Image (cartoon, helix red, strand yellow):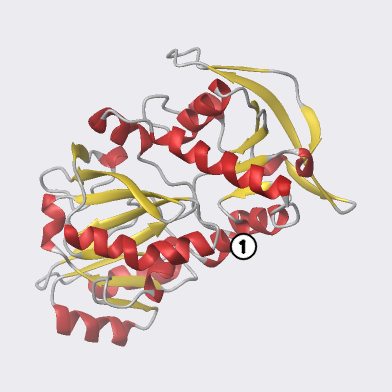
């Protein structure tokens, strides 16, 4: 089976080939004989009922400084693609939401991963609120009095932007900290959306675990340990990746959310777990494949492509 695959992502010249999950997804597709195109969300248009992308055919290589070759720009109708990987990084803003509306026109005739409607309806920090008993005590609000009351109950709290990413804007407010009101004022000045406030989980010092699920099933995990003096465990802010496996509680969490992920067409998902709690369900552009591959001696992208090829084949036979 040779497929036409378009990858909608950020500029390919800027990626870290030793950490980028989109890169290994592209390499695996190429190794299977699939044709690759690259374009950014800004290159996509709605034109007379068609979704057009100004895309370039690409060849990928694991060669630092020489990791891709791109052909000339081609104006392609995305419905002629077999698979579109929606892989641009957040923030999950109106530009991101608009891209999901456009891609909705071609899915499922063209398999969009992840399903654009479900991506739009499942922002990382909100989707988790639909599952009882697996998230830490949480408040989503812009109301200062509500936030103060939450802090009064739980003392040690985390405040972060509702649609932030990569650890940006995450604050740990300790019980004696006098900056809560000023911080909330700053948030409301820069963001129209409410804040997300959660009970601080001291287990984060032992790591924030990233678990990869494919079509609702867990396939691997890494632990991300924050640097000393840092509450954020994201690797691009200095978090250290550590080999890990799933605990019984984490398997329980995966079983709780897996059927919903599968039903909603969320094929490639990365969830974040601290201690016994699920904190985020990442459906936009999850990462972690290369780190897990290195620790576990696996090739998770192969399993993802097995799943995608099966779905395309089943769709073609209907």
Q: Quadrant of the N terminus?
A: top right
Task: Answer yes or no: is residue 190 visible.
Answer: no
50 displayed left or right of 78: right
91 displayed left or right of 69: left
Residue at 11% x, 73% y is 175
Residue at 43% x, 65% y is 259
Foreground residue among 304 and 103:
304
198 displayed left or right of 299: left
Splitting the image into 4 quarters, where does residue 178 fall? bottom left
How many numbered circles does the render carry?
A: 1
- Against 130, is 253 above or below? above
User: Which residue extends farthest right?
Assistant: 48
**Mark 1 secondary-structure assignment:** helix
Residue at 35% x, 52% y is 168
Residue at 72% x, 54% y is 102
Foreground residue among 111 and 96:
111
Task: Answer yes or no: is residue 258 visible.
Answer: yes
- Residue 39 pos. (x, y %): 66, 35
- Residue 147 pos. (x, y %): 28, 81
Splitting the image into 4 quarters, where does residue 308 fall? top right
Foreground residue among 190 and 43:
43
Q: Which residue is mark 1?
A: 117
């Amino acid at each position: 089976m040779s497929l036409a695959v378009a990858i909608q992502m950020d500029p390919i010249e800027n990626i870290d080939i030793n950490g980028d999950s989109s890169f290994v997804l592209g390499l695996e597709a190429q190794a299977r004989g699939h044709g690759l195109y690259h374009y950014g969300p800004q290159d996509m248009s709605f034109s007379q009922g068609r979704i057009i992308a100004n895309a370039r055919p690409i060849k990928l290589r694991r060669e630092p400084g020489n990791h891709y070759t791109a052909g000339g720009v081609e104006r392609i109708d995305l419905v002629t693609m077999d698979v579109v990987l929606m892989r641009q990084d957040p923030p999950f803003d109106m530009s991101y939401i608009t891209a999901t509306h456009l891609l909705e026109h071609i899915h499922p005739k063209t398999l969009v991963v992840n399903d654009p409607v479900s991506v739009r309806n499942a922002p990382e920090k909100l989707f988790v609120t639909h599952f009882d008993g697996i998230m830490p005590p949480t408040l989503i609000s812009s109301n200062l009095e509500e936030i103060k009351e939450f802090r009064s109950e739980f003392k040690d709290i985390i405040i972060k932007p509702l649609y932030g990413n990569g650890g940006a804007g995450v604050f740990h407010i300790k019980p004696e900290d006098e900056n809560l009101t000023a911080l909330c004022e700053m948030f409301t000045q820069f963001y129209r959306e409410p804040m997300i406030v959660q009970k601080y989980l001291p287990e984060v010092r032992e790591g924030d675990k990233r678990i990869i699920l494919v079509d609702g099933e867990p396939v691997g995990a890494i632990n991300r340990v924050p640097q000393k003096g840092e509450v954020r465990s994201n690797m691009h802010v200095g978090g250290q990746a550590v080999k890990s496996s799933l605990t019984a509680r984490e398997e329980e969490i995966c079983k709780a959310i897996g059927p919903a992920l599968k039903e909603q067409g969320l094929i490639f998902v990365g969830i974040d777990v601290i201690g016994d709690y699920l904190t985020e369900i990442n459906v936009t552009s999850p990462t972690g494949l290369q780190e897990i591959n290195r620790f576990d001696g696996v090739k998770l992208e192969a399993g993802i492509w097995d799943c995608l090829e099966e779905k395309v084949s089943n769709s073609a036979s209907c």
